[in-house]
């Protein structure tokens, strides 16, 4: 499988070249609550369907050979949401982690977690640790799940960690470069996203991967996350492949 064609409504066909995939795709999982509201359902119903969409898309990214997928699952600000909604998200996370522990080695999929995980309960922290241990033995597609994550908080955490190393004498302030600073980020060792996909129609980063997305190509769509499909992913990748990434230079 090298090319997949999709048809724009009333427009020309586009195509995805699977030999030129972005190395790293990041997705903001947005629109679960609005999806449920439009159907007269509780917001929690949207999160349940959104979790299934994540399974489908993550599996498909593995199948097509993507190296890295990073998803924004729960932000530092999401704790402000209604208690039952937060609890539902945490239950879905637990269910996903339990399933992942059973299937990661079979599917050769690595799971990593980005964010302040200290806020999670002990059971979730133990499951995360088990997923990390399994991932250390694997070599396949890496899925990074951002939980209790905020881009600004990540930068503050990195600066604090570097300052602590300065105090300890292992580095000097003058040693700091962009490459060294990246080693203090949650995403240390992971290439920056090539493509950022935001479903749900919003036009903002929402405090997601502020450092890492400096040169990412953005793809925005009104499709709500529970309705996001493989075809929508194809559209995003085709749009990415049609662009000329100059990184501030002139072609």
Image (cartoon, rainbow, N blue to C red):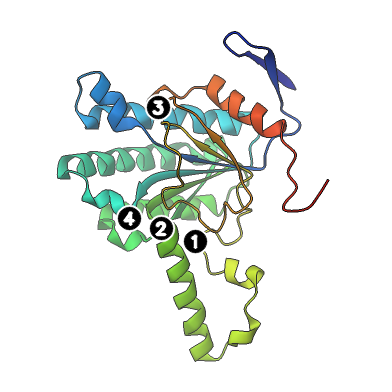
Residue underneath mark 1: 186
Residue 163 image offset from top left, x and y in percent: 49, 82
Q: CA distance from mark 2 to mark 4?
A: 8 Å
Residue underneath mark 4: 76
**Is residue 47 something one can see in this rendering?**
no
Q: CA distance from mark 4 to mark 1?
A: 14 Å
For label 4, the SS is helix
- Quadrant in the picture for the N terminus: top right
Q: Which mark is residue 115?
A: 2
Toward the right, the furthest residue is 251
**Is residue 239 something one can see in this rendering?**
yes
Residue 189 image offset from top left, x and y in percent: 61, 60
For label 1, the SS is loop
Using the image as rendered, state which of residue 128 and residue 90 is in the foreground. 90
Using the image as rendered, state which of residue 106 and residue 58 is in the foreground. 58
Q: Is residue 37 left or right of residue 214?
A: left
């Amino acid at each position: 499988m090298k090319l997949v064609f999709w048809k724009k409504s009333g427009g020309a066909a586009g195509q995805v070249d699977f030999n030129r995939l972005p190395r790293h795709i990041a997705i903001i999982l947005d629109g679960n609550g609005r999806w449920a509201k439009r159907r007269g359902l509780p917001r929690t119903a949207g999160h349940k369907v959104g979790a299934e969409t994540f399974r489908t898309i993550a599996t498909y990214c593995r199948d097509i050979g993507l190296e890295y997928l990073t998803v924004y699952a729960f932000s530092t600000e999401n704790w402000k949401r209604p208690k039952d909604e937060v609890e539902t998200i945490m239950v879905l996370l637990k269910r996903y982690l339990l399933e992942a522990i059973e299937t990661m080695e079979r599917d050769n999929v690595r799971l990593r977690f980005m964010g302040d995980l200290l806020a999670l309960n002990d059971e979730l922290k133990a499951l995360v640790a088990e997923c990390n241990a399994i991932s250390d033995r694997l070599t396949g597609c890496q899925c990074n799940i951002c939980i209790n994550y905020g881009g600004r908080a990540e930068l503050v955490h990195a600066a604090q960690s570097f300052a602590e190393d300065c105090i300890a004498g292992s580095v000097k302030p003058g040693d700091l470069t962009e490459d060294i600073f990246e080693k203090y980020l949650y995403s240390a060792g992971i290439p920056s996203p090539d493509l950022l996909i935001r479903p749900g129609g919003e036009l903002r980063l929402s405090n997601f991967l502020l450092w890492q997305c400096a040169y990412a190509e953005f793809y925005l769509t009104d499709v709500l996350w529970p309705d996001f499909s493989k075809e929508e992913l194809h559209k995003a990748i085709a749009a990415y492949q049609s662009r000329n990434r100059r990184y501030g230079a002139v072609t």
